[in-house]
Amino acid sequence: MKRIAILVLIFCACFVSVAWTQQPAAKGSANWTEFHRTNMVRWNPYETVINVNNVGSLQLKWSYNAGGPVNDSPAVVNGAVYFGTDTVSDPHLYALNASTGAKLWSYPTGILPLWSSPAVNNGVVYCGGGDPDIRGVPHNYVFALNASNGAKKWSYSTGIYAVIPSVAVANGMVYFGSQAKKVYAVSASTGHLVWTHKVGYYVQSSPAVASGVVYIGVLTGALDAFNATTGALLWSYGTGGLGYNSPAVVDGVVYIASPVNGVLYALNAGTGSLLWSYTTGGHFVETTPAVANGVVYLGGDDNVYALDASTGGLLWSTYIGSVENVSPAVANGVVYTGSDDGSVYALDATTGVVLWSYDMGAQVLSSPALVDGVLYIGDSNGYLYAFGLN
């Protein structure tokens, strides 16, 4: 995202491929638990309510004024939606009733902007935050809260180094990076450090975890792969540009976009070798791709792109304004994304045709989440929106 790039200056998915019509394997599987979802590709294969035929009838269900920009992706779990505010004026992490938008609880995260998206696992909300100490020096941390009432369970300090990216939760661990030029793994139950690994520069990429490997971008332009249990570096691939984008991982392939040269890379997840690359028509791609049914969806400063996941061949591209800051979400044959033009869009995943849009009246930097027939997304005016069918 542009705002993250500017901040630098101042400071497994092993799942079975399914068709669009597959029914949920178990109740609750549709939860959008973290930025990537647990399948690490921003695709909800369990959505059956909204489809290409009825998405044009989406209406505003409710909106909630959080008092500060809502610029990251919400998590939606078991009837509650969790999100934070990106503001230096009293930022909070919020929990709302997903059906009504009523506030359940909020947790003050200090006076530093809440940059990372929350992750929810086993009744606990994990997120990064920060607050100056008594000397006014920034003090940053990852914290864990009770998902039901917001009570603090633990926090892990990264000192003066900001935790900008979203965390990932897997294997009983919380994985994240910081501007300390480190990648961390802490116990999800206690917050105790399990391992940390020094990298070449700041880490502003959200990790993806699949098949016992943690994949994360480093601001040197590298995508690094670590053993999820030990933290040992397995391989590193240089993308030739600033590495603050987050990867997606599926079927033994890692997809990551380089933000400054507009190139999407597909790498062998086991070795880091290049499988293919695609150069977009724009200059900036500051988003995480979504992958569904053999197609990679990516937003740039010129178009939304759909590429063949095996070959990188272009399937379609659609212009809806600059979408370089918003990572798309895919569910039931529909691609959802926001635009710098202040609108949220729904596109046909097969053709790229715009099926629906809604003018939110403010820049959209929040990445959408789609759960049980409801689309959740925030805007820079401080609102979280929920859209659904009548």
Image (spheres, helix red, strand yellow):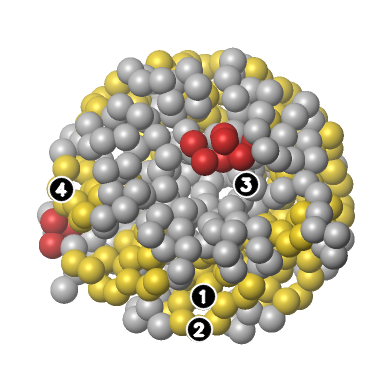
Which residue does the image show at 25% across and 50% down from the upper left?
Answer: 343
Which residue does the image show at 81% across and 49% down from the upper left?
Answer: 160
Q: CA distance from mark 3 to mark 2?
A: 25 Å
For the residue labelled by badge 3, is the local secondary structure a helix, a strand or a loop? loop
Instruction: Tell us which disc is closer to us: 4 or 2.
Output: 2
Label placed on residue 215: none
Q: Position of residue 313 (x, y in %)?
A: 33, 18
Residue corresponding to mark 1: 95
Question: Amino acid under label 3?
Answer: Pro
Q: CA distance from mark 4 to mark 2?
A: 33 Å
Q: Is residue 209 above or below residue 371?
A: above
Query: Are there few (<14), some (14-19), or many (20+) residues within 10 Å of tag 3?
Result: many
Which residue does the image show at 60% across and 25% down from the upper left?
Answer: 242
**Circles 1, 2 touching at the beta carbon (< 8 Å):** yes
Label placed on residue 104: 2
Question: Amino acid under label 4?
Answer: Leu
Q: Position of residue 164 (x, y in %)?
A: 64, 47
For the residue labelled by badge 4, is the local secondary structure a helix, a strand or a loop? strand
- The tag earlier along the polypeptide, 1 or 2, is 1
